[in-house]
Amino acid sequence: MTSESFEILDLVEQAVFVRDLHGRIQAWNKASETLYGYSRDAALGQFADDLLGSEYPISAADLLASCVAAGRWRGEVKRVSAQGSAILVQVCLSVRYDPSGNPIYLVETGREVKATSFEQELKLSEARYRNIFQAMAASFWELDFSNVNQRLRALRKSGVSDFRKYFFDNPDVVCELMRVARVVDVNDHTVQLFGRGNKAELLGNLLPVWPDESVHVFVEAMLSAIARKPHYWTECKMRRIDGSIFDALFTIAWPSKDMGGATSMVAIIDITERNRAQEMLQRVQSDFAHAARVSMLGELTASIAHEVNQPLAAIASNADAGLRWLEAAHPQIDKARESIGWILEDAHRAADVTARIRSMAAHRAPERNFVSLDGIIQEALLFIRHELQARSVAVVHNTSVEPPIVLADRTQLQQVIVNLTINAVQALAHNDCSLRKITIQTNVANDKITCSVEDSGPGIDPDHLAHLFDSFFTTKQEGMGMGLPICRSIVEAHGGCIHAENVCPAGGARFSFVLPVPDGEPCAPEGALSQLG
Ligand code: ADP
């Protein structure tokens, strides 16, 4: 630029400077010297944004692009003067083009936004924030992680890159990080929830409220900050100052730039009551499912008696035969041994039947294991084998190509299969057709495991379709209308869903349920899986 141009710029009251497209300062007027505190000599040739610590409301690249496209840009920019004080500048950037229309440099005029209105804004915003902080019916914590951040930076410098592994291998470091995190402020609700009416008890150290069983939550929160995630939340345990533990929903929001300097906000909600209500609901559902299982056993008494009687009758006749072989004029030891072998086999069969009944009748808390849904179906069919034979119903079980491994309570899922199959058997009884067939099919696709039970019965009255899963809906004279609602509550408790449909206008009913493929499924063969289950 010519010295004449400099002189003209010096006449302008606003801070004006010119930079090339790389951001290097080419011209710097007197008002810029006054506003930013850098002399012309100090400024020329410097990268403007580095020198002034500019913080634009959009990224520098976006700013340049929109400026070049539109010819100008207006907005507020935060800067730091040579004396180190923060200034907010109202900026107007204009683009200068060469005769062929190519941009050559940017001319910036700037005016400081009045400190008073800026500060007032800040104060207002601070007051709003304080108001929210105090008034919300949740526990809020302001935490200073600058010491934690310092140590994390030092660890990174010393070569730590896999922080998860490092924290796992060095629990003492985790304790140290927890020790140096500072509680700066808490709201009144926090004093009520955690304290004994004395806010000072909660300030400073985090350890009194952080029980050992939640150390992993601190680690996960740190890892989320290291991964530059904006926030992290989880359910966990927290400790009151009096030592009592409660269930909490914990959320931490990290400051937008780096963890350094700024404080982080933690919100904690006491969810003890919610968890208690949920546990109660689960207990009632499990009691109900158990009552339905016992009632189903009652309905199957004849079949069960037959199942037990069969091996008992075989035992008696083999024992009889064995005795005869021994009492013969020439005792036949080998034949007698063979009979005793059969007796043993039948005794095991009878024991298996009673074990199956006992596990169905048992009232124990539901437990989740990795089990094969096809294995569960096979066991459920064993359970009602006699019922199926007695009513001349053929069951085809088409197993999935990929093993359908679910994380489930074995007995509860057996109950679903038994309920659906018995319903199908009952529907077939009302059908005059000679083909009495039930097809059970499993399939694994798209992270979902599907199981359908389809019959060749009369199907479902379309008017009933919407009510089948309502409690006490039944069309049977002796029905209770609880089988399908229980199936639904079991399937939903396993994270799945169930629905009913008619196969086609002339076909029977199809009940299908879908369960999620569990995370962390073990790679074990079928045999090993049934042991796991
Ligand atoms: P319940 O068997 O005691 O009636 P459920 O809840 O098991 O109770 O079934 C509710 C109703 O759903 C049955 O009464 C019947 O009308 C209908 N339903 C269930 N399964 C079938 C099926 N396979 N075919 C036709 N209708 C069915």
Image (cartoon, rainbow, N blue to C red):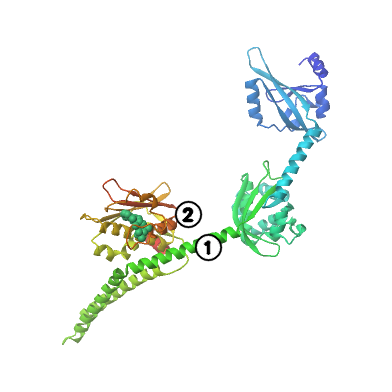
Number of other residues with Cα within 10 Å of mark 1, as a class: few under 14, some 14 to 19, many 20 or more? few
Quarter of the figure with the C terminus: bottom left
Task: Estimate the x, y position of residue 51 in percent, counting from the top left.
Answer: 76, 31
Task: Estimate the x, y position of residue 52 in percent, counting from the top left.
Answer: 76, 31
Q: Residue at x 66, y 30 (%)?
A: 60
State the mark number for residue 500.
none
Nearer the observer, 489 or 323? 489
- Residue type beneath disc 2: Gly
Q: Residue at x 62, y 46 (%)?
A: 231
- Helix, strand or loop status at disc 1: helix
Residue 480's image quarter? bottom left
Choose the circle earlier in sequence order: 2 or 1.
1
Residue linked to disc 1: 280
Number of other residues with Cα within 10 Å of mark 2, as a class: few under 14, some 14 to 19, many 20 or more? few
Q: Is residue 136 visible?
A: yes
Task: Estimate the x, y position of residue 18 in percent, counting from the top left.
Answer: 74, 21
Q: Is mark 1 within 8 Å of ligand 1?
A: no
Instruction: Point out the quarter of the image occupied by ligand 1.
Output: bottom left
Task: Estimate the x, y position of residue 358 in percent, counting from the top left.
Answer: 38, 71
Query: How many marks on residues?
Result: 2
